[in-house]
Image (cartoon, rainbow, N blue to C red):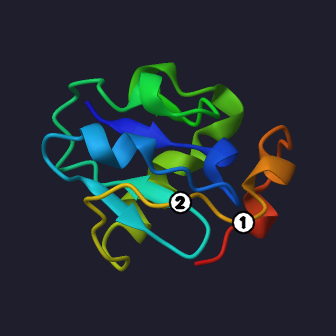
């Protein structure tokens, strides 16, 4: 099983989760992070670190966000690996409460 980064991360990209990952399975895009499903060891350390609750266990992913399973698997193959915490996006606070941000995902 894997953990999945979902809609809430888009345009926020907090990286608190990256810092605690023991297997460095996070990958970074312009305004979103993804988890490589084949590298994730299901340790659950990342989930409580996300300040916007964007990380879910695969079996707890909300029904309306199931497309993020495929998005994480696809984008981890093309985006670079990230292993250290960085500052969130400049306007992250403006986007933290916004839902349905999929149209803002920059690939």
In this orientation, which residue lies closer to the viewer: 63 or 105?
105
| Residue 45 at x, y percent in the picture | 29, 26
Q: Is residue 40 left or right of residue 104?
A: left
| Residue 63 at x, y percent in the picture | 65, 28
Above-or-below relation of 31 to 46? below
Identify the image quadrant of residue 102: bottom right
Residue at x 49% of width, y 19% of height: 60
Residue at x 84% of width, y 37% of height: 97
Secondary structure at numbered mark 1? loop
Q: Label for residue 69?
A: none
Considering the image in quadrants, where does the C terminus appear?
A: bottom right
Q: Is residue 90 left or right of residue 76?
A: right
In this orientation, which residue lies closer to the viewer: 16 or 55?
16
Above-or-below relation of 20 to 45? below
Q: Is residue 39 left or right of residue 3?
A: left
Residue at x 79% of width, y 48% of height: 93
Decide if residue 57 is in sight here: no
- According to the picture, the residue beneath numbered tag 1 turns out to be 90
Identify the image quadrant of residue 22: top left
Q: Is residue 31 left or right of residue 73?
A: right
Crowdedness near tag 1: few (<14), some (14–19) or many (≥20) residues, C-alpha within 10 Å: few
- According to the picture, the residue beneath numbered tag 2 turns out to be 87
| Residue 50 at x, y percent in the picture | 51, 34
| Residue 27 at x, y percent in the picture | 35, 64
Secondary structure at numbered mark 2? loop
For the residues marked 1 and 2, what is the alpha-carbon distance in whole angstroms? Answer: 8 Å
Above-or-below relation of 73 to 104? above
Residue at x 83% of width, y 42% of height: 99
């Amino acid at each position: 099983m894997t953990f999945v980064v979902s809609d809430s991360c888009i345009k926020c990209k907090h990286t608190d989760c990256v810092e605690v990952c023991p297997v460095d399975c996070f990958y970074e895009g312009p305004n979103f992070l993804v988890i490589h499903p084949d590298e994730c060891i299901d340790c659950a350390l990342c989930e409580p670190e996300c300040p916007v609750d964007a990380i879910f266990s695969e079996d707890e992913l909300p029904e309306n966000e199931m497309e993020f399973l495929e998005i994480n698997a696809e984008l981890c193959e093309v985006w670079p690996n990230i292993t250290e915490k960085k500052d969130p996006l400049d306007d992250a606070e403006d986007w933290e409460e916004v839902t349905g941000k999929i149209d803002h995902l920059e690939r």
